[in-house]
Amino acid sequence: MVLTHIPMPGLPVPPSWFPGHMMKFTRMLPALLTRTDVVLEVRDSRLPLTSINRTLEGALQKWRMERGWDPNDPSRRILDATACERIVVFNKRDLVPEWGIEPFRKATGKRFPGQSTLFASLHRPRDIRNLSEMLINIAKRYPHAMELNVLVIGMPNVGKSTLLNALRNSGIKGRTPKALQTSAQPGLTQALSTRLKLSLDPLVYAFDSPGVMLPFLGCGPEGAERGVKLALIAGIKEGMYDMETLAAYLHYRLNVLNPISPAYLKLLPSNAQPTADLQDFLTQLAQRMGMIRRGAQPDLSRAAVYFIRWWREEGGLLAASSAFLPATKRLGLGQGQGRGAQVSMEGDIATPIEQTGSSLLPASQGWGFDFEWDLQPTDLKLLSGSGDVGVREMVQAKMEGCIDQYLEMTEREDREELNVSPTQKKKQMVMEEKAKRKIKQARKRLAKSGS
């Protein structure tokens, strides 16, 4: 069975979670950057666009221009007297399918020039070594500098502290004790850390910073979806969302990522089929796990909590391990599928091609939780006849289109002030009114002194 219609669930208005320590760090950032040589921005690979903190972008752009980068060409540096590099680390790479990493890297290189990107996972020591070597090579390019100072920034719970501990273990020989505390819950780091030594020769130091959430997640469906995504990766404090709401969105996303064999089928009986009905799925899950309330009713709330916990601990790895669509289905799309259905396999990418008569039916595809696109009949023809290179070029083009949509959305939100909460707008109006009164009072005093 293949899901051909996967409706987006209704999502609530996103909550506001912006504690005082986040505001404090945001105000400190411009001063911190004057003592910073490398900004290491950590994002979550599952949310490579949603985990961008746009409130910090202005300070980072100003820092780069003050250090000699061309404001009209982000990839060109006019003055190169001191180190000034921005490295974006997409952490937890093992939680996204490997087939999309290289197309995504090329797509971001085109759309975000002037920043280096690296995918990393703590389960892949090579990634940590590559990042460590990248920092050491930057330090070696400026031998006159006494040391290289790295500032690590990012949203809550993207793995900043854990990544720094791993870098320290990689860069310094011998036993190195865990220098920074870590937690699965967001908000543990609430102040700038002391300097952490990452390398002895050359000297490389790093500062860990508090995770900073967006002050306001936005209006309309875009803001609602942004909030649920961040809550799913535990980037928002637990309890600010109803678990059934998170389960509804997670169920929807797993269906989009693999409409033939979603990862959640591993939780259900062997004869279970994909379903777009959340109630049906939670009922099956509750019955399978023995979550029964009085009156022999399935406990859907407990099932939703179990579903979220499972995905955060092992389900994410399972979802990421599948190919474009499951290779196990390449000889047929399951019982009940229309005649003529087949799946072509290109390298590690399997693609369903549904054929009815002479027409090809478009399918949907996604990567992580930020990328989703439709496969049109022309795309399916390309996939059925091209090799690995053609497939990856198509995926890269689709990802570039998704990034363009994201950039258009953020520009519209900035232009129409959709990323400013009603409370912030009221505060801004009050501040403007106070400023006007001060100007009037100053003019009156000048008028009296002149007379």
Image (cartoon, grey):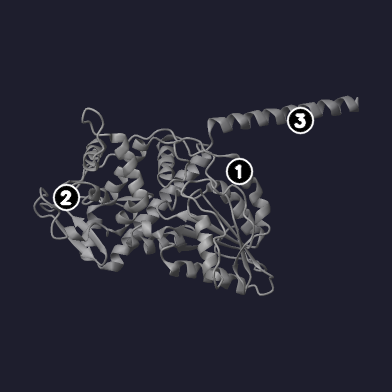
Image position, residue 23 (x, y; %): 61, 42
Residue type, label 2: Ser
Residue at 60 percent across and 54 percent down: it is 60
The numbered mark, 1 or 3, whose residue comes first in the sequence reads 1
Camera-nearest residue between 103 and 269: 269
Cβ atoms at labels 2 and 1 below 8 Å apart? no
Neighbour class for label 2 at 10 Å: few (<14), some, many (≥20)?
Answer: few
Image position, residue 103 (x, y; %): 37, 62
Per the model, the C-alpha gap separating discs 1 and 3 is 32 Å
The disc at residue 21 is 1
Residue type, label 1: His
Image position, residue 217 (x, y; %): 48, 39
Residue beneath label 3, please?
A: 439
Neighbour class for label 1 at 10 Å: few (<14), some, many (≥20)?
Answer: some
Cβ atoms at labels 3 and 2 below 8 Å apart? no
Rendered image quadrant of residue 172:
bottom right
Quick check: 6 left or right of 55? Answer: left
> Is 299 situated above or below 360?
above
Per the model, the C-alpha gap separating discs 2 and 1 is 48 Å
Residue type, label 3: Ile
Residue beneath label 2, please?
A: 270
Quick check: 109 left or right of 258? Answer: right
Q: Is residue 368 visible?
A: no
Helix, strand or loop at label 3? It is helix
Q: Is residue 257 visible?
A: yes
| Of marks 2 and 1, the one in the foreground | 2
